[in-house]
Image: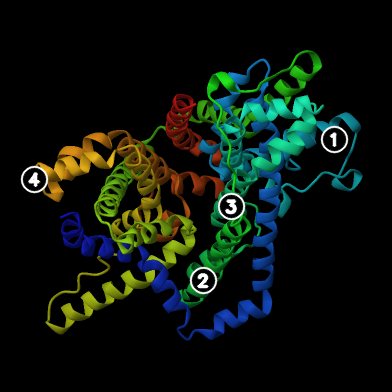
Amino acid sequence: MVLGLAKGWSVTSYALALLIFMPIIALIGQSFLPDEEVFLHLANTVLSTYISNSLWLMFWVVLGSLVIAIPAAWLVAKCHFPGRRMFQWALLLPLAMPAYVVAYVYTDLLDYAGPIQGSLRRFFGWQSPQDYFFPEVRSLGGAAIMLALVLFPYIYLLARTAFMEQSASLSQATRVMGCGPWKSFWRLSLPMARPAFAVGAALVAMETAADFATVSYFAVPTLTTAVYDTWFEYGSLATAAKLSTIMLLVIFAMVGFERFARRKQKLFQKQSSPGELDIYHLSGIKAGLAFSYCSTLLFLAFLLPFMILMQYAYYYFAQSWNAEFFEYSFNSLWIAMLASVICVAIGVLLMFIRRISPRRADMLPSRLASTGYALPGTVLAIGILVPFTQFDFAINDVAQFFGFEEPGLIFTGSTFIIVCAFCIRFAAIAIGSIENSYKRISPSLDMAGITMGLKPSGLLRLVHIPLLRKGIFAGLLLVFIECMKELPAALLLRPIGFENLATYVFQFVSDEQLEQGALAAIVIVLVGLIPLIYLNRSLEQDN
C-alpha cells in the first residue's frame, strides 16, 4: 500500500527537483554556445589570474580558519576556565556579521589615513609611506584575513561538537599512558576530529568561493568578480556562463575531494554524556591565556566591528532613519518570508515522499534539490538568467505574433526571479532541517496511520506535520536569515529600482560611506543573531 502511495506522488518530487536543478543544466548548456571573442580575450589576459586568486584565497581562508578555530574549539570543549560557558555560544557570533562590513571597518582602521597608521606616524615622527612598512589591507591577504574572521565558526562549531563527543575513557587512557593535555590533544583528539575539520573546511572553502562583496571591495580579481564584470560590463551571458561553469567545477571538485579523502575513515566510539566529559581544569597563567585567546578572537571578529557600526549608526542616525531604510527593510522582509515558506514546503514534500516510498529512486529528488546550496550566488544568478531570459523572449514573441502588446520582462524584470533564486539556493537548508526531524519520528506511526485508512495527504497533515514543527520552525528561521544576508544573487537579479538591505548596505560600502548604511547593517547583524541563539540552545539540549 505504501508503494502505491509513493508512486502517486513521486512525479511531483521529480518535477520539483528538476526545477531546482534547472540552473545547472542551463548553465552548462549556455557555456557551449558560441561567444568566443570575449572569453578568448579573458583567457589570453586575466583568466589565469582569476583562477589563481580564487584558489589561493580559498587556501589561505581555510588555513586561517583552521588555525583560529581548532584551539578555540578544544579549549571550550575540553578545558574549564573563566568565561568558558559564555565563549561556547559567543564564538558563533561572527557568522552574523557580513564579511564586507568587517572588511570596511578594518580598512577604515588600518588604511594609510586611518587612526592606527596616523597614530604610528605621530608617535615615531614618520612623514610618508616610504619611512615605514605597513601591510597592505586591500590585498588578497587582507581579504583572506577578513573572510577567516567571519567564517571560522563553521569549523569551530563542528570541531567543538566532535571534541565533546569523544569518549572520556579514551582521554583517561592517554593519561594513564603518561600523556599530558598537549600530547593527548595532538595524538588523540586532533586525529579523531579530522572528519569534522574536513567538513568544516569544505564549507569554508565554498563560502569563500561564493564571496563577491569582500573581494570586490578589496579589488581582488576572482572568478566571482569575473562573472559579475563579464555580465555587466561586456553583456556576454555566454562568457559569464563559461566562467560560472569553471567555478562550478571547482566547487564540485572540492566536495568530491573532501568525500574521497574521508572514504575509508571509520570511527567507532562510545560518546560521552555531559557528566562523563573529561575536562582539564586550567588555573593561573594557563586559564588567563585561554581566556585571553578566546576573548581576543571574539573582540576582533565581532565586538569591534559591531561597536564601530553602533558608533556610525549613532552619529548618522538622522541620515539613515529615512523612507528608503523602511522601504528596503520591507523588501528584504517580504522576500525572505516568502522564500522561506516555499523552501520549507519543498522540504516537507520531498522528505515526505522519500519517507513513504520504499524505492531507492525516490531518494534522488531530495538530493538533487540540495545541490543548489553549493552554487555561489553569482553562478546561480547566471544559471537562472539563462532559462528565464528565454522564457521572457518566447512570451513576447508569442504576444507579438498574435498582435497583442508585448508584456515585457515578466520573469527577469520582476522580483519573481530573486525569490526563485533564493528558493533554489536555500532549499537545501530546509530539506536538511526537515530530514533531521524526520529521523526522530518512528516508522510505526506511519504504519499505524495507514492501518487507520489515512491517505498520503492525511498522513502528512495529521501525523507528520505536528511532529515536524520544530524542524519546520528551524528551517523557516534559517532560510529567512540566509535570504536576508544573500547579496550576489540579489545584486545580479534585482529589477531596476529595486533594493533590499543587503544591496543597500553594499552600495554604501562600495562608495566608502558605510556610516550612512550602518543602521541597515546592524539590522542584518541582529537578525542574523537569532538562528545562532537558537542553534546554541539546540546544541545545549542535545549535549
Pinpoint residue 49: horizontal percent, then vertical percent. Answer: 69, 68
Identify the residue shown where x is 65% and y is 27%: 169
As measured in the structure, the alpha-carbon distance from the residue carrying label 1 to the one carrying label 2 is: 48 Å
Q: In this figure, which residue is indicated by the disc labeled 2? A: 245
As measured in the structure, the alpha-carbon distance from the residue carrying label 2 to the one carrying label 4 is: 49 Å
Pinpoint residue 137: horizontal percent, then vertical percent. Answer: 73, 47
Would you say residue 370 is visible in this rendering?
A: yes
Helix or strand or loop: what does disc 1 sit on? Answer: helix
Would you say residue 464 is visible in this rendering?
A: no
Q: Is residue 130 above or below residue 381?
A: above
Q: Are marks 1 and 2 in contact (CB under 8 Å)?
A: no
As measured in the structure, the alpha-carbon distance from the residue carrying label 1 to the one carrying label 4 is: 81 Å
**Nearer to me, 456 or 265:** 265
Pinpoint residue 207: horizontal percent, then vertical percent. Answer: 55, 51
Which residue is most to the top? 284
Q: Which mark is residue 121?
A: 1
Q: Type of residue at label 4?
A: Gly
